[in-house]
Amino acid sequence: MNQSVVISGAGVWNPPNILTNEELVGAYNGYAEKFNLDNASAIEDGDVAAVPLSSAEFIQKASGIKSRYIYVKDGVLDIERMRPSITRRADDELSHQAEMALNAARIALDEANKEASDIDAVIVGCAYTERAYPAIAIEVQQELGIDGFGFDMLVACSAATFALQRAYEMVKAGTAKSVLVINPELTSPQVNYKDRDSHFIFGDVATAVVVEAQESCTSEHSYEVLSTKAVTKFSNNIRSNFGYVSHAIDDDPFSPDNLFHQNGRGVFKEVCPMAAQHIADHLAAHDYTPDDLTRWWLHQANINMNLLISKRLLGRDATLEEAPIVLDEYANTASAGSIIAFTKYHKDLAAGSVGVICSFGAGYSIGSLVLKKR
């Protein structure tokens, strides 16, 4: 079977709360000043390092981020807590991530002109799931009334593109007519809001995409998936060690080492050339060059990374129309970033326009899809 596969609908759901750089910095600096005051003697003796202050200007210059959406804002700005205060839900209640996923899924289904009965499989791809099992995807499947199957997959910031590749392969092989791919990125619980270099990076969001056979597509805006490409290369430069094994090794599951941390300079130096070469190679497989693309829907981790990758490929700075940026509003939303960019900036392209969705993140992991507007 060699049928064409399309993305027929996509949706973004924003949590109700916005957290600005100024708010974050106010809480962080309040924490830092209190820590430095409480530990003044140890700091003076050299036994403890002083916590440096930050600024909204530093954050925007370093990342391009101005604000982010957050699922639960309460607790994050409390200098005695510095983490969201999320209410525990009972086993018979809808989980937080399933709720986020459903909000985005319904938007994507509407955009694709699809009912739940049209979907054969659900894939939830994200950086973290709030539990090991049962899968969030199966919970979503149950709530939507979808026959078939669902599963979760974690590939950090490339979870969305890797999940789309699985969906593409299923439809291409004829094992599913249509697949719902959802990325409920609840990132805020894994942020160390006491760390100057990373407390501002992440935001919460949920995205969803419908992938189906072209013959069944009835949506107004759809893109043929010409091919997908994925690569991984092990690196410790982006890491989170949180996991159930902490219980067995008497480790503090919430220590800084078990939350998100990275060697930012190392990531920038290594990932940018990898991602640029990955995209160039993927395009070359279709006899395209970067100049043949109308739009780049890139991973939204850091504006300087996106600018450098685009410049490596084009030999010049990309325009915002060519490579849209959503970092300023959303921050880094792990795997959802490139999908937000696609969802917000795809309806204006003319039939026959070619674009690429690309993610890059921990692993390292890089995933891409070459798309053509129908």
Image: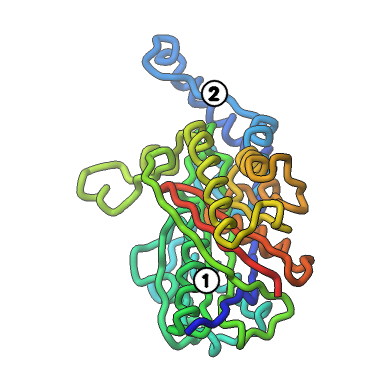
Q: Is residue 167 visible?
A: yes
Residue 210 or residue 58, whichever sits in front = 210
Name, please, the residue furthest toward the top: 45
In terms of image quadrants, where is residue 273? top right
The residue shown at (64%, 71%) is 10
Name the amino acid, label 2: Pro
Residue 201 or residue 70, whichever sits in front = 201
Say which mark, if any, is on residue 109: none
x, y percentage for residue 56? 68, 33
Name, please, the residue furthest toward the front: 287
x, y percentage for residue 160? 51, 62
User: Which callout, 2 or 1, points at the residue further toward the start of the chain?
Assistant: 2
Name the amino acid, label 1: Val
The residue wearing badge 1 is 181
Residue 42 to residue 330: above or below? above
Element at badge 2? loop
Q: Residues within 10 Å of mark 1 (few under 14, many from 20)?
A: many
The residue wearing badge 2 is 52
The residue mark sitting in front, 2 or 1, is: 1
- The number of callouts visible is 2
Give how far apart the Cα atoms at labels 2 and 1 are. 41 Å
Residue 189 to residue 134: above or below? above
Residue 88 or residue 355, whichever sits in front = 355
Relative horizontal placement of residue 346, taking residue 192 as reference (left or right) = right
x, y percentage for residue 106? 61, 77
Q: Residues within 10 Å of mark 2 (few under 14, many from 20)?
A: few
Residue 64 to residue 114: above or below? above
The residue shown at (47%, 66%) is 163
Q: Is residue 84 visible?
A: no
The residue shown at (44%, 67%) is 89
